[in-house]
Amino acid sequence: MRLIRQLPGIRTLLSAGDQGMSTAEYAVGTVAACGFAALLYKILTSDSVLHLVTDIISRALHLGF
């Protein structure tokens, strides 16, 4: 502890904590986001979801006012 008091730069580094992501964390986050986007795209362009959305829009347009 005495050494840390003598070196103010190290004390600042130790007390600062994590202030951002490293390059590896950005890479993992980017890959995860791309994977989630691909999965979401696959789900939303599937035949069952397309039929569901078409049915909802059809019912909304044919409501009797």
Image (cartoon, rainbow, N blue to C red):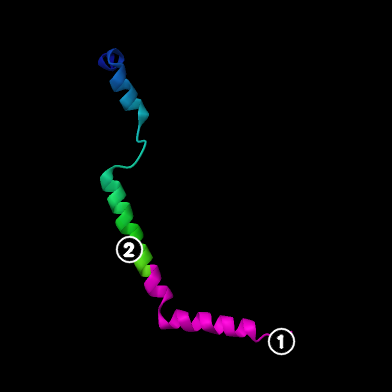
Q: Earlier in the sequence, mark 1 or mark 2?
A: 2
Residue 58 appears left or right of 14: right
Which span is picked out in magenta? 40-65
- The answer to which image quadrant residue 34 occupies is bottom left
* Residue 37 vertical placement versus 3 (above, below): below
Find residue 12 and report its horizontal and vertical position in percent: 34, 23
Residue that mark 2 sits on: 35
- The answer to which image quadrant residue 4 occupies is top left
CA–CA distance between discs 1 and 2?
42 Å
Disc 1 secondary structure class: loop
What residue is rendered at 52% in x and 79% in y?
53
Residue that mark 1 sits on: 64
The amino acid type found where label 2 is placed reads: Gly
Q: Residues within 10 Å of mark 2 (few under 14, many from 20)?
A: few
Find residue 15 and report its horizontal and vertical position in percent: 36, 26
- The answer to which image quadrant residue 8 occupies is top left
Residue 61 part of the magenta-drawn span: yes
Find residue 58 and report its horizontal and vertical position in percent: 58, 85
Residue 29 appears left or right of 65: left
What residue is rendered at 28% in x and 12% in y?
6
Residue 45 part of the magenta-drawn span: yes
What residue is rendered at 29% in x and 53% in y?
28
Disc 2 secondary structure class: helix
* Front one among 15 and 34: 34
Q: Residues within 10 Å of mark 1 (few under 14, many from 20)?
A: few
Whether tag 1 and tag 2 are in contact, CB under 8 A, the answer is no
Instruction: Specify the principal SS of the magenta part.
Output: helix
